[in-house]
Amino acid sequence: MAICVELRIPLFLVGKPGSSKSLAKSIISSSMQGNSSSPDHKLLRNFKQVQMFSYQCSQHSTPQSVIEVFKTAQRFQKGQDPTQYVSVVVLDEVGLAEDSPNLPLKALHPLLEDGTIGADDSDQNDHKMERV
């Protein structure tokens, strides 16, 4: 996960409830603090400082709401040194957005190039994951 964040590679964490997806996100968020990382984490001091922007997906999600969280992350990133900071969009419960008549996940296609972490508890079938 840390490598994907550092290199801005989109990542989807899919697992059953209680499989530590949120814990993994929290560990990355608190540990990847660039030069401000704990001296005990010498390797992480070489990584960029991460700033996460979370969005809670639901059946009421819209493409505009998904795009807005990406725009917020982009605005933050523009004011930072890209060699020192990385903005990450976290989409929680991505599977819930599948039930939205607004098709919010269609907005992801052009946005995934800048690094995304999606987390979901549902069992996504291969067809759904390929569309994302």
Image (cartoon, rainbow, N blue to C red):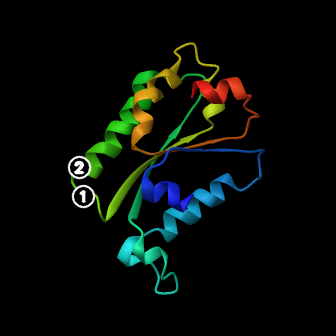
Instruction: Check the image and report above or below for 15 versus 20.
Output: above
- Per the image, the residue denoted by label 1 is 80
Task: Please tell me how crowded label 1 is: few (under 14), some (14-19), or many (20+) other residues with Cα within 10 Å.
Answer: few
Q: Which amino acid lies under the numbered mark 1 shown in the image of this protein?
A: Gln
- Per the image, the residue denoted by label 2 is 78
Q: Quadrant of residue 85?
A: bottom left
Most foreground residue, 8 or 72: 8
Q: Position of residue 40 (x, y in %)?
A: 52, 86
Instruction: Check the image and report above or below for 131 versus 116.
Output: above
Q: Position of residue 44 (x, y in %)?
A: 47, 74
Q: Is mark 2 on a helix, strand or loop?
A: helix
Q: Which amino acid lies under the numbered mark 2 shown in the image of this protein?
A: Lys
Q: In which quarter of the image is residue 36?
A: bottom left
Kindly indicate whether the residue at mark 1 contacts the one at mark 2 (C-beta within 8 angstroms): yes
Specify the label residue 15 is tagged with. Answer: none
Residue 84 seen in this snapshot: yes
Q: Quadrant of residue 107?
A: top left
